[in-house]
Image (cartoon, rainbow, N blue to C red):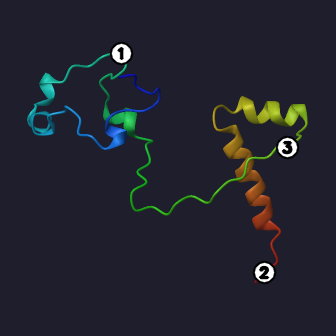
Amino acid sequence: MKKELGHSDTAKGTRGDTDWERLRAQPDSEVVYTEDAPMTSPDDWANAIAHKGLPIPSRKTQIALRVDDDVLAWFKAQGTGYQTRMNAVLRAFCDAHRPDT
């Protein structure tokens, strides 16, 4: 039987082979770490965000926006997340110029 790419048995509702009870009972000292699943420390999770119970972020719309080369270079030089920072600057401008209601 040929399997479709991109689909797994669990996605089709069949039960997997994982023994969850045994896994829950396994002590941390028996966990096997690999390059794909390395050991982590609390510092690795310090900036993680738990979304459970938090409000869902507002929806964003993808657009094509023309920006001066030097402006884009400056934001990119600040590191990853430059598009989020550009959005924050635009939001701050909007908030500063909203009429009082």
Mark 3 lies on a secondary structure that is loop
Disc 3 vs disc 1: Cβ atoms closer than 8 Å? no
Q: Residue at x 74, y 58 (%)?
A: 91
Q: Nearer the viewer, mark 3 or mark 2?
A: 3
Relative image position of residue 58 (x, y in whole percent): 61, 60
Quarter of the image with the N terminus is top left
Mark 1 lies on a secondary structure that is loop
Horizontal arrangement in the rendering, residue 28 relative to residue 80 (left or right): left
Relative image position of residue 47 (x, y in whole percent): 45, 42
Name the residue that disc number 2 marks. Answer: 100
Relative image position of residue 95 (x, y in whole percent): 75, 66
Disc 3 vs disc 2: Cβ atoms closer than 8 Å? no
Q: Residue at x 67, y 45 (%)?
A: 84
| Alpha carbon separation for disc pair 1 and 2 | 54 Å
Q: Say whether disc 1 or disc 2 marks the residue closer to the N-terminus.
A: 1
Q: Residue at x 15, y 29 (%)?
A: 28
Occupied quadrant, residue 15: top left
Q: Amino acid at mark 1?
A: Glu
Q: Residue at x 36, y 15 (%)?
A: 35
Q: Looking at this view, is 19 or 4 the one in front?
A: 4
Instruction: Assess disc 2: are there few (<14), some (14-19) or many (≥20) residues with their C-alpha within 10 Å of its C-alpha.
Output: few
Q: Amino acid at mark 3?
A: Leu
| Alpha carbon separation for disc pair 3 and 1 | 39 Å
Name the residue that disc number 3 marks. Answer: 65
Quarter of the image with the C terminus is bottom right
Residue at the far bottom in the pictured view? 101
Disc 1 vs disc 2: Cβ atoms closer than 8 Å? no
Name the residue that disc number 1 marks. Answer: 35
Horizontal arrangement in the rendering, residue 85 relative to residue 50 (left or right): right
